[in-house]
Image (spheres, rainbow, N blue to C red):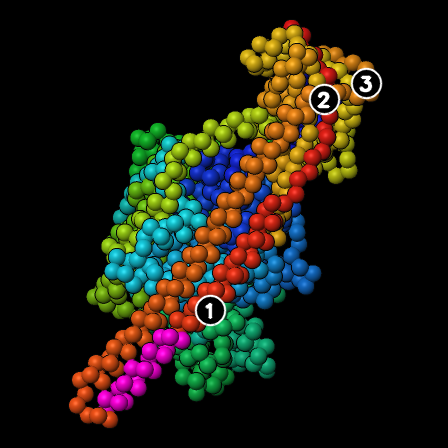
Amino acid sequence: MAAVVTSYQAKYFAHELARNYANDQVGKLAGLLFDAQVEPKPHQIDAALFVLQTPFLPGVILADEVGLGKTIEAGIVISQYWAERRRRILIVTPSSLRQQWQQELMEKFLIPSTILDSSSAPGVLSHNGVRPQEVLICSYDFVVRHESDLVRPWDLVVSDEAHRLRNFWKKTIKSANVMARISRGSHKTVLLTATPLQNRLEELFGLVSIFDPEYFYSLNAFRERYVKNPVIGDHAGLAQRVATISKRTLRKDADKYIHFTERLPLTVEFMPSPEEIELYDAVNEYLQRDTLWAFSQSQRHLAALIVRKRLGSSTFAVASTLERVAARLRDQVAAGGVGSSPDDDRAQYQLQDIGGRSLEPASHYNAPASLGAPLWGGDEVTSDLSEAFERSETQHIPSYEGSTANDAVPAAETPASASPSATVGAPGVLRAMSAEAEELEAFAVLARSITVNQKAAKLAEALDAGFERLRELGAPEKAIIFTDSTVTQRYIAETLTSIGRGEGLVLFNGSNNAPEQTVIYQAWLEKNEGGDVVTGIPAVDRRKALVDYFRDEANIMVATEAAAEGINLQFCSMLVNYDLPWNPQRVEQRIGRVHRFGQQHNVVVVNFFNKGNVAEQRILELLTDKFKLFSQVFGASDEVLGSIEDGVDFEGAISDILNRCKTAEELDAAFEQLEAEYAPEISSELARAKVNVFDNLDPHVQDRLKAYDADSEAVLTAFERLLLAVTRRELDEYADFEGDGRAFTLHRTPRTGIPAGEYFFKSQPRPHAHQFRFNSDLGQWVVSTAQEESTPPRELVFSIGSSARVSSAVKALGSTSGVMDVKLVSFRMKARGEDLEESYLLAGAVTDAGEWLDEEYVNDILELACIGRGEELATVDVSSVKPHLEERLAELENDVQSRNARYFDEQEELAYSNIEDRRAEHDAVIAKYRLQENAARRLARNSQDATERIRAKKETRRWMNKISEAEQEFHAARMELEEKMDENLVLMEQALRGTRDVQEVFSIRWKLVP
C-alpha cells in the first residue's frame, strides 16, 4: 500500500472503519478494542457481545467464575454505549470497589466517571438530570439513601457484586428493592456476580426479577415449576431460560487464554510483650462496659470496632486515638456536658465523634481546622465503614446480639448504654465523664511507654521469608505491606529504616502529600510531561506516580487501605497483612491488587499470628480455613464470600463477639457459631441444580471462544492498517509521520479542541505523547473527513509490483482492467425503542472480459498502490455490475432478516414460557382445590349423620365450582395473553423488518499493471 492513499481508497477504508457490524460480530467492537488499554480475552468479547445482542431483554447476568474479568466485560459494554452517545450510565458497586471502577474505566477505556458521595451528589444529581459526559459510580448504601434522585431514565445500569441482590425474592432487602426500582427506568441492566446461587434456587428468581419481574411470572409459578420437585424441578427447561438472560464462563473454558497463579500463605508467629498484653486487656475491659460516655449510642459499635482495630495495629495508633477520645470528653465536660442548643450540640458532637472528614473516603481526609483534630488522629477509615457511620447519623443502625442499645437515646446527650434517666450536665455525670477521660489518658500513657511492638520486631523475619519464596518462584523481590493506620504506617517505615531497609521504601496513603512523596510526584510529572498519562488531577496523579515508582525503583510499599482500592500491582508478588482486616471482602480486595490479570507468578501472602491473643487467632483461622482467602487460585473462596451481603455487618458481628465475650471459652463458642453461619456446604440438590442450570449454559462455548480468538486478532490487525492509511492521507498537511506512520507529530490542529503534539498508535507506544484513538476527536475527524472526500468517476491505475500487500487472487488477474461500483447499504430496525443498524459495503467489479469480481477482490484491489489517476469521466457504465450487486444485496437482506428472526423466536419462546409459568401456578391452585373437594367428598361418603352428609355435599359442590371458576379464569387469561402476544409479535416483526438505505460511494474504471 502506498504511503499516502487516494481519496477513493481513503473513502472506502473510512466507510469500512465506521460501518455498523451485526451485534454478534467482533467487528462491532473493533474501534473500542483498538482504543482500549487492555487486550480482551475471547470469553470477555463473547460476554460483551452477549449483552449487546439481546436488544429485547431489559437485563442480563454475567456470571463468570471469579478471576475471569467481569469488570473488563462490563467495561467493553460501557465503552460501546459511550461510543454510541448513550451516556446515561450508572454503576452500583460495594463502596470498597468504587475507586477501582473509576480507575479501570479511565485507564483501560478512557471513560471519565464521577463517584457519587455526600459531597458530590447535590451537584451531579440536580433537577437538570444526569450530566452526559460522565459515568456515575455509587455504592449500594448511597442508592438506598438517594433513591428518589436515582430513579430516572438510564441507558445502562451495571450492578457489581450483584449476589447481594439475590434475596430480592424475600422483598425485605432494602437495597435490592431500590435497585429493582432503578432498573425499571434503565434501558439495560447488567448484573455481575460469580455466585448467582448460594443457598436456594429462589435466589435466581430474585436476581432476574431485579430487571424483569415478569420473566418467571411469579414466585409461586417459579416454585411450582422448578423448586417443589424433589430433584429441584426441570433443570433442562430452567437452564434454557437462564441461558437466554445469563452468560457464565468457567475457568476450565478459559484456561487456554489466562494464566492462573496460586496464592501461597506464609504465617509468622509473634508473642506480644507483657506491657502489650496489659494494654490490650485494659482497653478491652473498657470497651466491654455497659456504660461509656465517650461514644454516642448509635455509633458505639462502629466506634468500638475502630478502636479495637487501632489496638491491634500498634500501640502508637491506639495511643493517638485514645488521646483524642479523652480530649473530646474533656471538652464536653468543660462545656457542661452539652451546649445551650441540644439539637445543634448533637449534630456537632456526632460529626466530631466520628472523626470529622477523616471518615470520608481516602481522597477527602484532612478536616478543616474549625473541626479540630479528627478523633482517629488523622488515620484513614475504609470507605465502607465511612458509609456505615454516615448511615448511622441518619438512621440508628441495628444493634448486634448482646447489645443493650437504646435507640431512643440521642447522641452526645446520654452515653452508650447508659440509663435514659441520666441527665448530662448533672454534677455526678460530669464527674463520671471526667473519670472516664482520666482513665483513657492513663491507657494512652501506657501505650506511649511501649516503644517496641513485637509484631514489628518480627517484620524483618516475615520479609526475609517472603523474599526467599519469591526467589524460588523467580519473581521480583517486591512486597506491599498493608496496615489500617497511618500512624502505624509511619512506625513501620521507621522500623524498616532502622534495620537497613529504608532504601527502596515508598509510602502510600489517602493524602500522599508527605515531602518524600511529593519529590516522587514532581519527578514523575517531569518525566511524563505532555503525555496522556498525566490527568491534571493531583490526587490521581500522585497515586500513579507512587505506583510507578514502586514498579520501577522501590521494592517495599507500606500502604494503608487507600491502596486496596483502585490500583493495580500485578508486578508485585508478595503481600503482607500487617493488620488483618476482619472483613473477608476487604482481605480479598487487598489481595486482588497483586493477584489479578497480568500476574505471572504465584503470590505470597504473609499473615501474623498473635500467640497471646485468642480473638486474633480465631479471626485468622476463620479467614484461612472457612473462607480460604490465602490459598489456591482465583476465586477459591468465592462460594463462601458470596454468602456475605455486607462486609461491615460481618465486621460488626466480630466486634460484637469481642464486646461481649470475656473468656476464651466464650470466644470459642461465639466464633464456632459465626463459622457455622457462613459454612460453605450447600445441599446436594442445589449443587446439582447449580451445575445443570448455570455451569453448562452453553455446550459450544469452546468452539466460539476459538473463533473469537482468531477473529479478534484479524479484525484488529485490519482495523489498524486501514486507520493508518486514512490517517496518513487526511493529516498529510497537518503532521509529520515517522517510520511506518504509527507515530506522528501534529504541528497544526485541524479543528478547535484537538491538541497538537506527538501522537502514537497503541501498537507503538512512546512517552510524552498522546495515544491516537479511533473514538477521539482527532480520530473521528480523520474518518469523517475521508468519508466526505470528493470521488467523481475516473480511471485509477494500480501497480501490483509497487504494493506491499498483494493477494494471490489479484496476482492471478495480471494486467486487467474493468469497472467497479461501491455502495454503502444500511439496514435499520427498532427494538424496545433502541435503534439497531447494520451497514455493509456493497462492492463489486467486472473486468473488460466480463469476469465478475466480488467484494473481496474489490478490497484487495483498493489496498494496492495507486500509481496513476486519469481525467474525470462523465460517467462509468456499471450496468454489468448492477445485477451482481442486486443479488448480493438480496443475500445481505436475507442474512439480516435471519439474524433478526432470532430475536423474534426468542421473544416468542419467552412468551410461551410465561404461559407455562401461569399454567404451573394455576395447576397448583387447582390441586389445592381438588384436595379440599376430595376431603369434602370423603366426609359426605363416610358420614352417618344426614345433616352432616348434606353439608359435606354442599362443600364438595362449592369446591367443584371454585375449580370450574379457576379453569375459566385461566382460560380467559390465557386467551387474552395469547392475543396480546400475537399483537406484540406482529409489531416486533414489523419493527425488525425495518428499512433499507443504499448510498453511492463511488464508481470507477480501474486498471492493474505489473
Report if the CB atoms under discs 3 and 1 are less than 8 Å apart.
Answer: no
Residue 934, picture quadrant:
bottom left
Residue 737, picture quadrant:
top right
User: In x, y percent, where is residue 858?
Assistant: 63, 20
Q: Which residue is mark 1?
A: 972
Q: Residues within 10 Å of mark 3 (few under 14, many from 20)?
A: few
Q: Which residue is mark 2?
A: 878
| Quadrant occupied by the N terminus | top right
Instruction: From the viewer's perspective, tell me whether residue 251 is left or right of residue 47.
Output: left
Instruction: From the viewer's perspective, tell me whether residue 449 is left or right of residue 19.
Output: left
Q: Residues within 10 Å of mark 2 (few under 14, many from 20)?
A: some
* Residue 872 numbered mark, or none: 3
Return the residue nearer the eye: 307 or 920. 920
User: In x, y percent, where is residue 224?
Assistant: 34, 64
* Residue 664 numbered mark, or none: none
- Taking the spot 38% from the left edge, 68% from the top edge, the residue there is 922
- The earlier-in-sequence mark between 3 and 1 is 3
- The earlier-in-sequence mark between 3 and 2 is 3
Q: Secondary structure at mark 2?
A: loop
Residue interval drawn in magenta: 948-965
Q: CA distance from mark 2 to mark 1?
A: 60 Å
